[in-house]
Amino acid sequence: MTTGAIRLVYAVFLLVQLYVGVLLGVAVTGSSTRRLFDVAAVSDLPRWALFCGWIVFTAGTVLAFAIPLRLLPVLLLLVYVTVGVQSLVTKAAGETAGTFTAAVVLAAVTTVLDRRPSMPARLVLLLPGFFTLTVGSLGMRGLTTLAGGHVIAGFTDLLKLVTIVTAIALGLMAGATLTARGDDLARDRA
């Protein structure tokens, strides 16, 4: 709990630093803050490039967290499952539902895999899939849009950030709870 709270405060400070950096950049360049409004970019990457991008992302996660290289295929499969579930459910029911459902599936699968002696701890299995669900850019986009004078759009992004973060947290808890056994609960308490 303490570690999570420390990381949350650290993330907020990083977000504020980024926000101040954007405002300083605007001041130094003399640009108008009205130009900070977020504009949707067209999706111009082919699907195969996105598919390959997740390989690079997962390999980077393995290297960044010193995860044994032998786990790369399992972690990559978990990333693809997470992204696939999130994409399908998002198309059918919206972003919050897609993120929640993907978090439930990710937590359930990693809880089951954690029971196998050949698998690492659940936290290691969760890492790459969890990072595919996180929404750090939403906070920055919301603050930047606020600074640009677009109050409603800025607060909409910040509200979406809170909603998605809550959906991820509840989804991870729900998935772990749905697949938990008595011996899992006893081990977690110990």
Image (cartoon, rainbow, N blue to C red):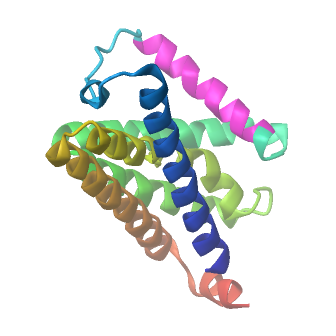
* Occupied quadrant, residue 75: top right
Depth order, front residue of 161/91:
161
Which residue is more in the foreground, 148 or 167?
Answer: 148
Asked whether the viewer can see residue 119, the reply is yes
Above/below status of 46 relative to 17:
above
**Measuring 41% from the left and 9% from the top, which residue is drawn there?**
46
From the image, give the main secondary structure of the stretch colored magenta.
helix
Q: Quick one: 141 or 186, which is closer to the camera?
A: 141
**Residue sitting at x 84%, y 45%:** 66
x and y, in percent, of residue 102 in the image: 40, 51
**As displayed, is residue 94 above or below residue 120?**
above
Compared to 27, does 179 lie above or below? below
Identify the residue shown where x is 46% and y is 65%: 172
Q: How many marks?
A: 0
Q: Position of residue 125 (x, y in %)?
A: 66, 53
Where does the image place residue 11, in percent across and percent down from the top left? 56, 57
Residue 93 visible in rendering: no
Residue drawn where x is 67% and y is 73% of the image: 3
Q: Position of residue 166 (x, y in %)?
A: 36, 65
Q: Is residue 48 magenta?
A: yes
Position of residue 10 in the picture relative to residue 146 (left or right): right
Q: Nearer the viewer, residue 4 or 109?
A: 4
Query: Is 42 rendered above or below residue 32?
Result: above
The residue range painted magenta reads: 47-63
